[in-house]
Image (cartoon, rainbow, N blue to C red):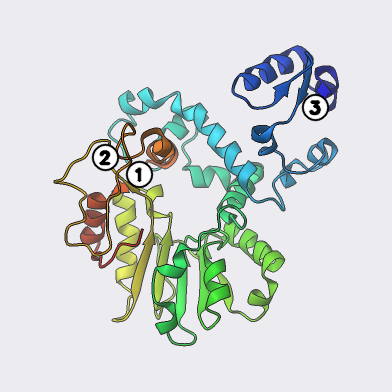
Amino acid sequence: GMHIAEIAERCAVDVRKLEHILHLLCLRHVFKEGPPQVFANNHLSEALDTGKSIIELQKEPNNKHNRTSGKTAMFEIRAEGSKFSSFLLEGLTNPRMKSSHEPNQTVFQYVMGTEMTFWEYIAQPEMDYMCHRFNIVMKGWDVDPDVTILKALDWCSLNKGAKVVDIGGGVGSAMAPLAREFPHLQIIVQDLPGVIIDATKVWNDQLPNMVKTAQVIFQSSNFFESQPIEDASVFYLRRVLHDWSNKYAKSILQILCKVIMPHSRLVVAEHLLHPACIDPLHDTGEGISGYKYNCAPEPLLPNFGVAHELAYMTDYELFSGQDRTLTAMDDLLQDSGWHITYVRL
C-alpha cells in the first residue's frame, strides 16, 4: 500500500480531497485501506490499471490506453455517463429536447453546452483524447473477442475474393476473427477518416500481414451519404443502428438497398431488448427462424433486470439512439426494405 500523502504528492492533488474520495471508493470495494490512511489495490481497482507509471501518464496523457485491452477506457466512458444520467428529467421536459430524436438534441448537448453531435464533438482536435479513447474501446482485441460473427453465415460458401464490408466498423476489431478463419475473403472496414487512421495503426500493430497483402483494407466512408462498394457479398453492421433513432437508422439501411446484388446479405449484430415482464403476445419471434426468448429465473426479472441497465441509458443520453426489441428491429428493417430471415443468439 501507499500512504495518502505520497499518493497525493505524486498525483499533484489536494491530500484531504483525495483521501475523502478514496474513502468513498473503499465503500464501494474499489481499493482497500489498512492501516489508516494507507491505500492499496484490490481486484476491482486493478481493473482500472493501464500498467503505466504516473510519470508516463503525466508526460503523455493521450497514450494512457495505448496497448491495453480497452477495459480501462471502457470504464472511463461508462463513468462519464453518470454526468448525463443526472439530467434525464431535462431530456424529457426541456422544450427543445422532449420531442426530438435528433442526435444533436440530447442530454449530452444539454450538459456539455454544445450544438454538435457526440461524434462531431469528439472529432475536434482538442478532444483527441476522447476520440482516441473511444476508438480503443471499440478495438476490443482482448476484451471478450467477439467470435459470434463466425457463426453468422456459412462463410465457406462464399467465393474467393468475396467482399465483406464492415460499415461503421471502427478499428475493425469485429473482422479480426473472420480474417483469421477465412483468408479467402476480401474484408473492407469503413468509417470516418479519423477512425480509419486509428484502424490502420491497430491492424499494422496486431495483424500487419493482413494489411500488407490487402486481405483487409480500410476505406473512409460516411454511411449517410453513399455506399461506395457496389459488389459486396455481405454488408455487416455491428452496433451501429443502436446509435441512431429510427429516422437515421432507416436512412443507413435504405442506402444499402440501392447497391445490393441478388446474392448480397446484410448481417446486423445488435443487442435485443426484452420487456421486464413476460408478454406472450410480443417478441416471441413467431415466424422468425432461430429466435428464442430465454427468460431469467425467478426472482430475477425476465430480462435480467439491472444487468442490462446500460442498454437503456447510454445510447439515449449521447445520441438519441436506442437498443431495440425484436419487434422494433423487425419493423425498422421492413420499413427500410429488408426482412429478417434468421436470428442467431
Residue in the picture at 65% in, 66% down: 203
User: How many residues crowd mark 2 within 10 Å: few (<14), some (14–19), many (20+)?
Assistant: some
Residue projecting furthest to the left: 281
> Distance between the Cα atoms at labels 2 and 1?
14 Å
- Across and down, in percent, residue 289 comes to 24, 65
Tell me the residue that label 3 is attached to: 11
Above or below residue 224? Residue 18 is above
- Across and down, in percent, residue 114 comes to 49, 34
Tell me the residue that label 1 is attached to: 322
Residue in the picture at 84% in, 27% down: 10
Disc 3 residue type?
Cys
User: How many residues crowd mark 1 within 10 Å: few (<14), some (14–19), many (20+)?
Assistant: many
Which circle's residue, 3 or 1, is located before the other in the chain? 3
User: How many residues crowd mark 3 within 10 Å: few (<14), some (14–19), many (20+)?
Assistant: few
- Across and down, in percent, residue 182 comes to 52, 78
Instruction: Indicate left or right for 215 with 42 as reference.
Output: left
Which circle's residue, 2 or 1, is located before the other in the chain? 2
Q: Are marks 2 and 1 in contact (CB under 8 Å)?
A: no
Q: Is residue 162 visible?
A: yes
Front in this rendered view, residue 123 or 321: 321
Residue projecting furthest to the front: 298
Foreground mark, 3 or 2? 2
